Each structure stands twice: as C-alpha cells, then as structure tokens.
Amino acid sequence: AQSVTQLDSHVSVSEGTPVLLRCNYSSSYSPSLFWYVQHPNKGLQLLLKYTSAATLVKGINGFEAEFKKSETSFHLTKPSAHMSDAAEYFCVVIRGGTSYGKLTFGQGTILTVHP
Amino acid sequence: DTGVSQNPRHKITKRGQNVTFRCDPISEHNRLYWYRQTLGQGPEFLTYFQNEAQLEKSRLLSDRFSAERPKGSFSTLEIQRTEQGDSAMYLCASSRREPGDEKLFFGSGTQLSVL
C-alpha cells in the first residue's frame, strides 16, 4: 500500500523567509508524487508533481520539491514566503502503475505567514 | 467559469434524512472522482467514473451511499439515512485521460452537516 506522512501539522513563517513543508512517502512501486494547496473556500489546486522525469520539480508560485528516493522524502520548499501562501498543503501519492487519479493524501500542513 | 462546479455548497440535514449532491465536471473531462474530507484530515478517495461507468468504489462507500453519472457528464452522490459520522466535505474532481499526465481539477466541495 502507498501512503504519505506530513511531518508537521502546522508551520509558521515570517513573510520573506524560506518555507519548508516536509513529506515522507511509502510505496511498493515507483510512485507519482504531488503537492496540492487548499485555500479557504476554494478547491484544491495542484502545485507540482513528480513522475520520475526529474528529481527536482518546479511548480507554480515559486514552489519546488525534490524527490529523494534514499530518504523516501518529497519536501516542498519556497525561498521567500508571501502572505498569499497562507493555506493548507497536502502531499499526495499515486501508486506506480495506477492509470487513473486515485490519490492518497497526507493529513495536511497548515502554513501561516506572519507580516 | 469553466471549472468543476458542486452544488449545494452547504447542506444541513437531520439524522436519518436522505441527501443528494451534484457535481458538474469540466466539459471535456471524461473522468470524475468523489472524495470525502473530514476535519483535520486529507481527502479520501470514494469512487471513480470513466464516462458513465463506475470503475472503482472505496470500502468507505457503504451501502447507504450511491453515486451515478448517467450520461457521462454530471454526477450525483446520494446518502440515504444519514448519520452524524457522514458529516464532512464532499469533493468532486474531474480529469481528462492523458497517459502519464493525469491532472485532477477539484471543485470547492459540498459541506454536509448531519444534526
């Protein structure tokens, strides 16, 4: 079975400082990994995805994530936080070989950005 | 707006009543998903349609739950004899089959409260 563990339920940063949201995965097969963001009263939005083409993945809004097989990690980073980044972030896995969008979500990390 | 639309946004019902939610996917998307999200958790997969065919149902979907997509366009999710444990956000997502590049677009969800 595949799963993801988000190591922090809440992360608080100051505007302009780096963001690090941690995610470890477990999968029996080569997984596809994603980060989604959920703003209040809005639908989940895809930030970026990893599908084995490159280990460093760049997404929207300046976010990026690095797939590290040896550490089974897929941490999300951003060099400089903006107030608009405040939201809940989900690390997501699809089992390798799955031909449709049966996503397994982590429990989420709430990011707070202080002025 | 041509995104995924869900109605109603909120539903309050008494225990034992039946409720029905509707999802209108992005028009050219042939795949449709239902997920459920409870407070403090990530979304959990419920079921998946390709066109009008329901191809997978999670064990989370008890006999009281039924989903349909009669013409391969909009979908409905019905819960019969609601229980307090059914209180959650019900999310719909759609996608277009693209080998190796599945991207789900989520609606804003229907928040169900069972009193």
Image: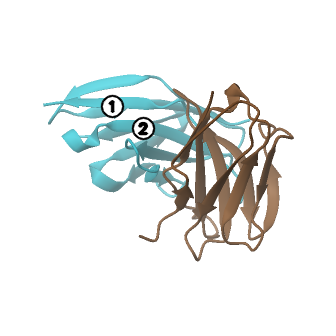
Taking the image as drawn, is residue B109 in sight? yes
- Marked residue chain, label 1: A
Q: Quadrant of the C terminus of chain B?
A: top right
Q: Quadrant of residue A77?
A: top left
Q: Quadrant of the N terminus of chain B?
A: bottom left
Q: Colour of chain B?
A: brown
Q: Which mark is residue A111?
A: 1
Q: Quadrant of residue A11?
A: top left
Q: Colour of chain A?
A: cyan
A99 or A39, which is in the foreground?
A39
Is the residue A110 above or below the residue A34 in the image? above
Residue A66 percent location from the top left of the image: 42, 42
**A27 lies left or right of A11:** right
**Residue at 74 percent of width and 38 percent of height:** B17
**Residue at 71 percent of width and 52 percent of height:** B77
The answer for how far apart the CA atoms under marks 2 and 1 are is 7 Å
- Marked residue chain, label 2: A
Amino acid type indicated by mark 2:
Tyr
Q: Is label 2 on the same chain as label 1?
A: yes
- Considering every residue shown, the one lying at the far bottom of the view is B28
Q: Which mark is residue A89?
A: 2
Work out whether mark 2 precedes mark 1 in sequence or the reverse, and give the earlier one: 2
